[in-house]
Image: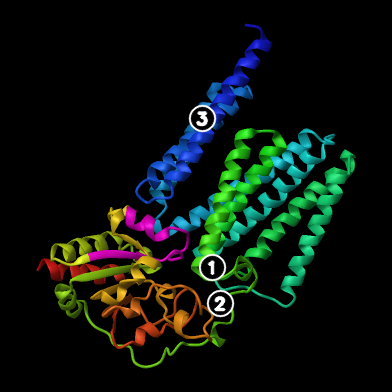
């Protein structure tokens, strides 16, 4: 076989591998739409990416030995992350993964320019610039999101006078640099614009995420996920890699769709999320009648109500993740169900710190998928529910969103937990949630607060059922 024939054969084999990878990406994304098939969908998509990377490296002439070394290192990092990272740390890890994707795309675009500094095709130059710009802002934006989620940076919106004007000015300057870069065909001049675009993109990532409060982090995470896909797509165009274009396009589009769903779940526009500084003026927001005396009870007294209930709904929130209570919650649900009651789990789309956070936690505890009920469905019947147990959720059950026009979250769809016949709220204290807004649910006549660690409270209820 001549070298030319061998190259043509390798090109055909690689193209077929890319087609297979693209099909696996699409099937994997489809399977991610259901909790029942999401885990397999993730594996299918990962297999597609594995095939694409391997054949790309082989076609590039990389020695099998180094490919094996790369696979071993990547697998070790993945296994270590899966074993070491706590479920409460998943949002932070997702944020860092998004940032890693953005950084990789930025470096690909930057290196592509240096590999071909005499490039004069405008389309390629535009792709290089977009890969650098979107990738850079995804990287630093994700790092800031990680800092806010982990508590290393204050989760409240960080605002300063003239912030939006400064941010707008940075965007205009960056676009100007992009126009000059794409319109200049002199490598010596263009070489100046690329590092400038890198620096500006890194700064833009910081200034666009820093004003966003912790309550909006699920939207930010999904948006940054979309950015990482778009950056990869631009990098794919820059280096002429079809599978990178397809994969990046799929991630970018799915991330935008998810972002839109999250915004609708909060009844807010993306513009409002990005520029309103939500949560910075919570003290001025209405309290929604959050006055009075909260009534507390003990797990032992709550047991008698649960023991007599015929229907129970759990509303999980980030507090359940912090307490690592998902396993004992499932055990309690099993006991309640064995006692003859109907049990379900109401999931708010933005509960937790990332999209699908509660679904992941409950799946870890092997809660049956058919027990998970979406917000709109549970709200249709919640007034017939005997007991609603709110575990560490706060903002997503705040009736001020429905009743108080002065509340910052007014208009946001919530789970109508306050309409259940009895409500148990498991919290450590009366403190507000991540959005910093008082919750009138705590003072309703049908609500009883059970203070303490959620896991310890649920364990006490389990012991009552077993005794």
Task: Point out the stretch of residues depicted in magenta.
Answer: 343-363
Toward the bottom, the furthest residue is: 292
Q: Nearer the N terminus, badge 3 or badge 1?
A: 3
Q: Residue at x 37, y 76 (%)?
A: 416
Asked if residue 31 is positioned above or below residue 64 in the image, the reply reads below
Secondary structure beneath dot 2 equals: loop
Q: Residue at x 30, y 88 (%)?
A: 445
Report the quarter where the N terminus lies: top right
The residue beneath circle 3 is 20
Toward the left, the furthest residue is: 467
As measured in the structure, the alpha-carbon distance from the residue carrying label 2 to the one carrying label 3 is 46 Å
Locate residue 110: give its quadrant: top right
In this rendering, would 338 be left or right of 16? left
Q: Nearer the N terminus, badge 1 or badge 2?
A: 1
| Residue 287 point in image, percent of width and height | 47, 87
The residue beneath circle 1 is 216
Q: Would you call the spot at circle 3 few (<14 residues within 10 Å), some (14-19), or many (20 or more)? A: some
Image marks 2 and 3: residues in contact by CB distance under 8 Å: no
Residue 303 visible in image: yes
Was residue 251 drawn as part of the magenta stretch in this picture?
no
As measured in the structure, the alpha-carbon distance from the residue carrying label 3 to the one carrying label 1 is 37 Å
Image marks 1 and 2: residues in contact by CB distance under 8 Å: yes
Label for residue 279?
A: 2
| Residue 437 point in image, percent of width and height | 48, 81
Q: Residue at x 37, y 51 (%)?
A: 35
Q: How is the image coloured?
A: rainbow
| Residue 105 point in image, percent of width and height | 65, 44
Q: Would you call the spot at circle 2 few (<14 residues within 10 Å), some (14-19), or many (20 or more)? A: many
Asked if residue 411 is positioned above or below residue 326 in the image, the reply reads below
Report the quarter where the C terminus lies: bottom left
As measured in the structure, the alpha-carbon distance from the residue carrying label 1 to the one carrying label 2 is 9 Å
């Amino acid at each position: 076989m001549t070298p030319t024939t061998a190259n043509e054969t390798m090109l055909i084999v690689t193209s077929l591998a890319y087609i297979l990878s693209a099909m696996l990406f699409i099937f994997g994304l489809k399977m991610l739409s259901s909790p029942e098939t999401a885990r397999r969908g993730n594996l299918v998509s990962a297999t597609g990416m594995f095939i694409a990377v391997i054949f790309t490296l082989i076609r590039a002439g990389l020695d099998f030995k180094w490919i094996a070394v790369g696979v071993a290192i990547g697998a070790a990092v993945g296994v270590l992350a899966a074993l070491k990272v706590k479920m409460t740390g998943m949002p932070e890890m997702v944020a860092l993964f998004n940032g890693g994707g953005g950084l990789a795309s930025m470096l690909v675009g930057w290196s592509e320019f240096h590999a071909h500094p005499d490039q004069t095709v405008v389309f390629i130059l535009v792709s290089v610039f977009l890969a650098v710009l979107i990738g850079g802002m995804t990287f630093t934006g994700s790092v800031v999101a990680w800092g806010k989620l982990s508590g290393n940076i204050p989760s409240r919106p960080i605002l300063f006078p003239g912030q939006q004007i400064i941010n707008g000015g940075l965007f205009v300057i960056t676009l100007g640099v992009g126009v000059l870069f794409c319109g200049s065909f002199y490598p010596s001049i263009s070489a100046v614009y690329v590092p400038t675009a890198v620096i500006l993109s890194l700064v833009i990532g910081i200034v666009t995420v820093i004003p966003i409060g912790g309550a909006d982090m699920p939207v930010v995470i999904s948006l940054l996920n979309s950015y990482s896909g778009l950056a990869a797509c631009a990098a794919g165009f820059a280096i002429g890699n079809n599978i990178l274009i397809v994969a990046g396009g799929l991630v970018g589009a799915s991330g935008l769709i998810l972002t839109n769903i999250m915004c609708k779940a909060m009844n807010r526009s993306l513009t409002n999320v990005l520029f309103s500084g939500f949560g910075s003026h919570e003290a001025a927001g209405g309290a929604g009648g959050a006055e009075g005396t909260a009534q507390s009870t003990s797990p032992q007294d709550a047991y008698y109500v649960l023991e007599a209930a015929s229907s129970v709904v759990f509303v999980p929130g980030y507090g359940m993740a912090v307490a690592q209570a998902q396993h004992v919650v499932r055990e309690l649900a099993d006991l309640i169900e064995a006692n003859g009651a109907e049990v379900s789990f109401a999931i708010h789309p933005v509960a937790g710190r990332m999209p699908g956070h509660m679904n992941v936690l409950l799946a870890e505890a092997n809660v049956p998928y058919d027990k998970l009920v979406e917000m709109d469905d549970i709200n249709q019947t919640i007034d017939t529910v005997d007991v609603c147990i709110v575990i560490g959720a706060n903002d997503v059950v705040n009736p001020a969103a429905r009743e108080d026009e002065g509340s910052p979250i007014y208009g946001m769809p919530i789970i109508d937990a306050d309409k259940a016949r009895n409500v148990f709220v498991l919290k450590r204290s009366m403190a507000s949630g991540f959005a910093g807004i008082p919750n009138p649910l705590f003072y309703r006549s049908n609500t009883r607060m059970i203070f303490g660690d959620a896991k310890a409270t649920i364990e006490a209820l389990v012991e009552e059922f077993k005794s």
